[in-house]
Image (spheres, grey):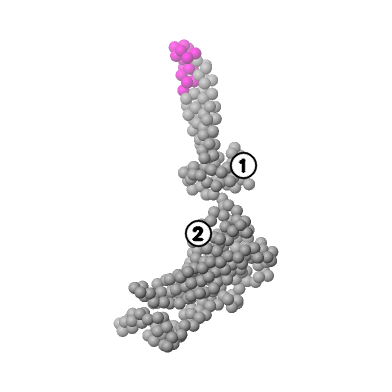
Amino acid sequence: MKEHSTFRLSCLFPPAILLLSGCALPTIRAVTTRVPVEKIDANRRIHSVAALLVIPSDPANTYLKTYKTIWGKTDYTCDVGAFVEDGFLQAFSQVFDRVEVVRTEESGREYPYLLKPMLAVNRLIFEQRFMRGLVAVSDVTGKVDVTSKGAVVAVFSANSSLVEVTADASNFEGMLGLSMAKATAKVSQQISHDLVLSPAMGGAPMAIEVPGAASRFADSTATMPCSIGKCYLKTTGKEVLADSFLGAVVFGAIGYGIGYIFYGLGDGSYNSPADSAAHAGEAFALVGAGAGASYGTWWGLIQSDKCWSQDCR
């Protein structure tokens, strides 16, 4: 009980003072933690393979900062390269066809694109927050140089701003790592978003997904739906409706024409020997027209669905 009370009291002070109560370590290492990078909101993709350069031995991939007080000192450290590799690999995999990690710049030059990420840790520490207690705080700035054939194509950068995670007294290093991972994921997502939309990268529109029939009728930026087995340039969902209506009219007219031929076998008086043929022809004309219209609509939708879900190049 005494130990528990000591911890609660110590959490009222900055992290360095925790050394006096035994609640903190002289060295706190941010444990590498995987945080999913959110989906990049850009309907484009770069149809190419890229190499992600991460060199573990690079001094820039090791962070160490010491905070000193009159009570002692605490070293904060983390493997920056591990966070870079996990976060940026997730993010860039959303915008390139394939991304592979390389350890040397020479091996990365064999790829169409070489991505050279750098992550500067502006802040990585535990801080006290009113009413929240101790929180793990991270603030990082990311920068990525994109090269192709030895020349720099573009440079992108982003800042995470402060990312805070409420500290868990039983897992200081894990909470610090979680804060660092969230900050890295935020930066990598923003840089990947800017990269794929950059004119310098020439990202191509992604294939449009059609989850249901309703989405076919919404205006869109589809560029290659088909018509009767051949690819044409289409721009809006309105043309899908036009195809469906045209199919209904054409097949409906064919059905009605066949029915009218049968109807012509009778004399239309309904009391002649051809009375049965007259009734049959009239019925076939109506049913044929309805069936033809239905089939035409179905045909139009099926063709449109194929065009919206397949690449017609």
Looking at the rendering, the stretch of residues picked out in magenta corresponds to 267-283
Q: Residues within 10 Å of mark 1 (few under 14, many from 20)?
A: some
How far across and down, in percent of the image, does residue 53 sit? 61, 69
Q: Amino acid at mark 2?
A: Lys
Q: Residue at x 47, y 21 (%)?
A: 282
Q: Is residue 208 visible?
A: yes
Residue 218 % position (x, y):
49, 44
Residue 39, disc: 2
Can residue 216 be seen here?
Answer: no
Image x and y of residue 6, in percent: 33, 83
Direction from residue 18 to residue 5 in the image, left or right: left
Determine contact: label 1, label 2, CB under 8 Å.
no
Residue type at mark 1? Answer: Cys
Residue 110 counted in the magenta span:
no
Q: Nearer the viewer, residue 270 or 306?
A: 306
Residue 133 in which image quadrant:
bottom left
Secondary structure of the residue carrying tag 2 is loop
Q: Which mark is residue 231?
A: 1
Residue ID at (52%, 21%): 260
Residue at the (60%, 63%) spot, across then down: 99
User: Tag 2 or tag 1, which sits nearer the N-term?
Assistant: 2
